[in-house]
């Protein structure tokens, strides 16, 4: 009995030393421009940062959800970055509009852990989403991580998931429109004077 009690701390120490350590980094939603008029398009980058440039851990796979305000923005497309496919040899990447206002995007790298650890930059764009602006207002963009893993396949933890806001403004009336409206108002006032006089 005493022998098994003494072995328990040793087994626990061995398990802790073998278990992979979760590394933390930051994921951020970064609009390429903070405001857009109705009818315009806006591109939004999802950026990974705080990874060691040229060292482990590097990002080998991700599965992320982006929430967006579907009353102000409509989805137009996704373009994936190249930091998980360093040599253009291929990887698995796809996206899905799971519901209005929710986009799921994932990517798995086929590059070796050694290549990703030595060549992946410390800051890079995972993917860029393009939206069409459909209605005025402040549109919130949020991010949630379903899973993140290093090039070796160990779990990574996002220390921060930073969202953003995009301002969708109404299309301004051109100067000629204001001139036309003021001219029509003047004509209306002038015709009332003629009828009254």
Image: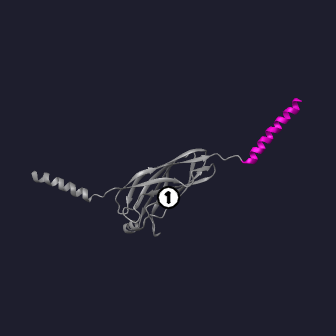
Q: Residue furthest right?
A: 197
Q: Position of residue 183 (x, y in %)?
A: 80, 42
Q: Residue furthest top?
A: 196
Point out the stretch of residues depicted in magenta.
174-197
Color style of the picture: one colour
Q: Is residue 93 in view?
A: yes
In this rendering, position of residue 161 left or right of residue 70: left
Q: Magenta segment: does it hold 194? A: yes
Q: Is residue 99 in view?
A: no
Q: How many marks?
A: 1
Q: Position of residue 98 (x, y in %)?
A: 48, 50
Quarter containing the C terminus:
top right
Residue designated by label 1: 127
Q: Is the residue 89 above or below the residue 162 in the image?
A: below
Q: Return the residue nearer the eye: 181 or 70.
A: 181
Q: Is the residue 140 above or below the residue 114 in the image?
A: above
Q: Position of residue 61 (x, y in %)?
A: 41, 60
Mainly helix, strand or loop, the magenta region? helix
Disc 1 on helix, strand or loop?
Answer: strand
Q: Position of residue 42 (x, y in %)?
A: 58, 53
Q: Is the residue 87 above or below the residue 163 in the image?
A: below
Q: Magenta segment: does it hold 45? A: no
Which residue does the image show at 62% across and 46% down from the upper left? 169
Which residue does the image show at 15% across and 55% down from the upper left? 7
> Pointer 1: residues within 10 angstroms few (<14), some, or many (20+)?
some
């Amino acid at each position: 009995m005493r022998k098994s009690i003494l072995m328990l701390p040793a087994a626990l120490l061995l398990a802790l030393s073998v278990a992979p350590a979760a590394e933390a980094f930051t994921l951020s939603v970064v609009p390429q421009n903070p405001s857009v008029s109705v009818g315009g398009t806006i591109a939004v980058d999802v950026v990974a940062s705080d990874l060691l440039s040229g060292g482990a851990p590097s990002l080998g796979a991700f599965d992320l959800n982006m929430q967006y305000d579907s009353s102000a923005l409509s989805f137009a497309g996704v373009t994936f970055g190249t930091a998980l496919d360093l040599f253009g040899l291929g990887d698995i990447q796809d996206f899905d509009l799971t519901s209005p206002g929710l986009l799921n995007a994932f990517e798995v790298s086929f590059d070796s852990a050694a290549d990703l650890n030595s060549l992946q930059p410390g800051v890079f764009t995972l993917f860029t989403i393009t939206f069409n602006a459909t209605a005025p207002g402040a549109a919130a963009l949020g991010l949630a991580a379903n899973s993140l893993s290093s090039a070796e396949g160990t779990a990574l933890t996002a220390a921060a998931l930073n969202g953003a806001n995009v301002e969708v403004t109404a299309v301004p009336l051109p100067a000629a429109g204001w001139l036309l409206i003021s001219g029509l108002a003047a004509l209306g006032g002038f015709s009332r004077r003629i009828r009254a006089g």
